Structure formats: structure tokens, C-alpha cells
Image: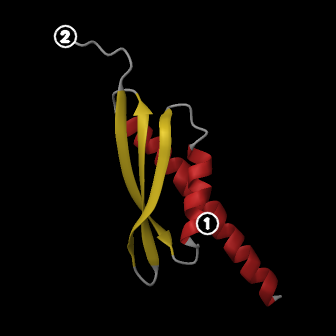
Amino acid sequence: AVFVHNEEKRRVRTRFQVPSSIEPNEAIHAIKDRLEGLDFIDGEVDVKVLEASLDSYVLGIDVMCKGVYEEPYRSEILKVALDTIKGLNEEYYELLYALSA
């Protein structure tokens, strides 16, 4: 028997470091919310803490993507995640500045 699949999917996994000044659950929820809106993601977005130290922790993202190649999707996922973390980090420092004034 020969099976032909017109719809190709690829599991994309990536990981990146986040400063410990950002609360993990806040980062996870914010990243999931942003990624779930991307049209190439097919299904659930799984974001979890993989490692932790005093200064930072490592988040892992695991998603199914529509298409054959991993790298273009991994790049887009990382750009969204990094932009999200940058925004959360800026909010943290603005709050610290406001509290110290």
C-alpha cells in the first residue's frame, strides 16, 4: 500500500534563555498567546521550563508546523519569543524605576 500525504507537518523544537527577573508563568503565557496566532502553527503550543539557575532559566517551545522545513519556522518562533521577553523585561525595569522614584 502506498500512502500519499498532501499536508506535510514538522515538529519544531527550540529553546532560549530568559532572565530570572521575569516570572516563568508570565513568560510562558505571553509567549503562548503570541505564538498561537501564527498561521503556520498547527495545534497546541507547548512552552515549559527546561533548566534553571539563579540568574536565568531556559524555556523550551515545542510546536507542530505546516510545512517541510524547520529552520524558517524556528527563526520566526524565536523572533516572536525574544520580542515577547524583551517587552516583559522592559515592563519590569519601568516598574522598578517607578518604584524607586
Quadrant location of residue 72? top left
Q: What amino acid is at disc 2?
A: Val
Residue 85 in percent (x, y) is at: 58, 62
Q: For the residues marked 1 and 2, what is the alpha-carbon distance in whole angstroms?
A: 46 Å
Residue 49 against residue 15 in the figure, above or below: below
Name the element at disc 1. Answer: helix
Q: Position of residue 29 (x, y in %)?
A: 60, 58
Nearest the viewer among 47 and 16 is 47
Name the spot of residue 62 as percent of width and height, x first.
Answer: 40, 49
Q: How dense is the environment of label 2, judged by Cα within 10 Å: few (below 14), some, or many (20 and up)?
A: few
Residue ID for mark 1? 26
Judged left or right of residue 88, residue 16 is: left
Contact, mark 1 vs mark 2 (Cβ under 8 Å): no
Q: Position of residue 58 (x, y in %)?
A: 41, 67
Q: Can residue 50 be seen at all in this image of the molecule?
A: yes
From this view, report whether residue 101 is shown above or below residue 95. Answer: below
Question: Callout 1, which amino acid?
Answer: Glu
Q: Earlier in the sequence, mark 1 or mark 2?
A: 2
Badge 2 marks a residue whose secondary structure is loop
Q: Residues within 10 Å of mark 1 (few under 14, many from 20)?
A: few
Quadrant housing the N terminus:
top left
Residue at the outermost left position: 1
Residue that carries the numbered disc 2 in the rendered image: 2
Q: Nearer the viewer, mark 1 or mark 2?
A: 2
Residue drawn at x 57%, y 54% as measured from the top left: 31
Task: Identify the coloring.
Answer: secondary structure
Instruction: Identify which residue is drawn at 39% across, 19% down.
Output: 7
Residue that extends furthest to the bottom in the rendered view of this protein: 100
Which quadrant is the C terminus positioned in?
bottom right
The residue shown at (24%, 13%) is 3
